[in-house]
Amino acid sequence: MHKIKTILLSWQQTNLMLRISIGIITGSILALIAPGHSAISVMGDMFVGALKAMAPVLVAVLVTSSVATARGGLGSRFRLVITLYMLSTLLAAVLAVSGSRLFPVSIALANIESASCAPPPGQLADVFSNIIRDIMSNPISAIINANYLSILFWAVIIGLALKQMANGQTISSLRQWADAVSKVIAWIIQCAPFGILGLVYTTVSQSGLDIFSTYGKLLLLLVGCILTVSLVLNPIIVGCLLRRNPYPLVWQCLKESAVSAFFTRSSAANIPVNMALCKRMGIDEDFYSVSIPLGSIINMNGAAITITVMTLAACETLGLNIPLGSALLLSIIATLGACGTSGVAGGSLLLIPMACSLFGISNDIAMQVVAVGFIIGVVQDSVETALNSSADALFTITAEMHERTKKGWK
């Protein structure tokens, strides 16, 4: 028993990223040697399932607790982080327009069967209508269905009500619940190397190299835009705001957040990972417990890129000459539409028909574009989510550091 405890302690004290790296390498080797074993793949399913199961509860409890116990002075940070979220998403869409015009890509729509998926929104007004309807959902069903818009809304309302009550015993109990849920999340994250091993094993086992040859140019354009935002655009924004070299912070967020998001392919599932990163960075819990879940909803740089690139690829395939003004209007629509994107794998693809409708492209053609998105999704959705989720942590930490610098805090 003592040896087992020693091994477990040693495991926990080893750097998490080192353990995840070992899991990635091991999963890749196992997939090449012995592909197709469900017993290995199930580890990845269990890990993602556990994160998705606990993330709504974590957000509900932490946001309620944070609002109920919040001190003054959070307003400027929230305004700044929301501005960063929206600005970076808009600039990502504009970058995608520029990339698509410089390197136009067409796709063989006639040879792609329509994908089976949920009905997409037809107009931008439908997106806003869906957002409002989601916000006003039953809070219990919101937690069950992982409806983060509704969870955030009701958690803030309940937190404000508890704040007005000023009941010390209730607040203390709420903090204990928040600590307990956070502890469970910490246990789940300790299992990340095994979960990542299973996810890598599944991906390498099931995904051949065909997608790289058939849709190589499209993938290259998408990944190129996403990497440019991650390594150039976002660092410029952070550097201008903090007036220092942004890359140490950018690299830390990519290393600790983007890696797990890449394999889980879910911004929602990566919320606990980002919260744990912010906690290690010493960020105010009252702030990050709200800004991180909010970022998983409205900070959708990668989604805006996907919507823009795929729509312009459809236009190129159909021979449509899109003026620059119309392309920039697409950037705005993609930005606003991306804010309504579901924080789950493939969520951004369902917004493509809405963007295509701007240029009069029929829903039948648009759904073929969506089908292409699902085909390349194993790569596209992974890098998209890695950008989306790591930027949540990056801009949250940036907003906090900017506030501390402004006030002369250490």
Image (tube, rainbow, N blue to C red):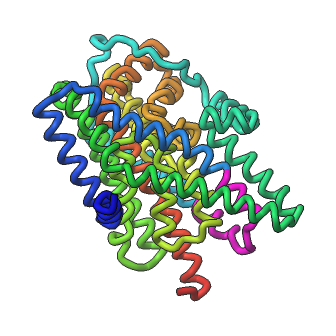
- Residue 75 within the magenta-colored segment of the rendering: yes
Is 67 magenta? The answer is yes
Above or below, 364 relative to 387: above
View extreme (right): residue: 165
Which residue is depicted at the point 29% across and 30% down? 39
Q: Quadrant of the N terminus?
A: bottom left
Residue at 47% across, 34% down: 348
Q: How many marks?
A: 0
Q: Would you identify the image quadrant in which residue 112 lies?
A: top left
To which quarter of the image does residue 376 belong?
Answer: top left
- Taking the spot 53% from the left edge, 52% from the top edge, the residue there is 184
Q: What segment is highlighted magenta in the picture? A: 61-82
x and y percent of residue 7 in the render?
29, 60
Horizontal side of residue 313 vs 205, given as left or right: right
- Residue at the image position 83 percent from the left and 63 percent from the top: 163
x%, y% of residue 330?
49, 37
Where residue 205 appears, as percent x and y from the top left, is: 20, 29
Q: Find residue 141 and report its image quarter.
A: top right
The answer to whether 30 is drawn above or below residue 397 in the figure is: above
Which residue, as the protein is rendered here, is positioned at the far left? Answer: 33
Residue sitting nearer the eye, 48 or 236:
48
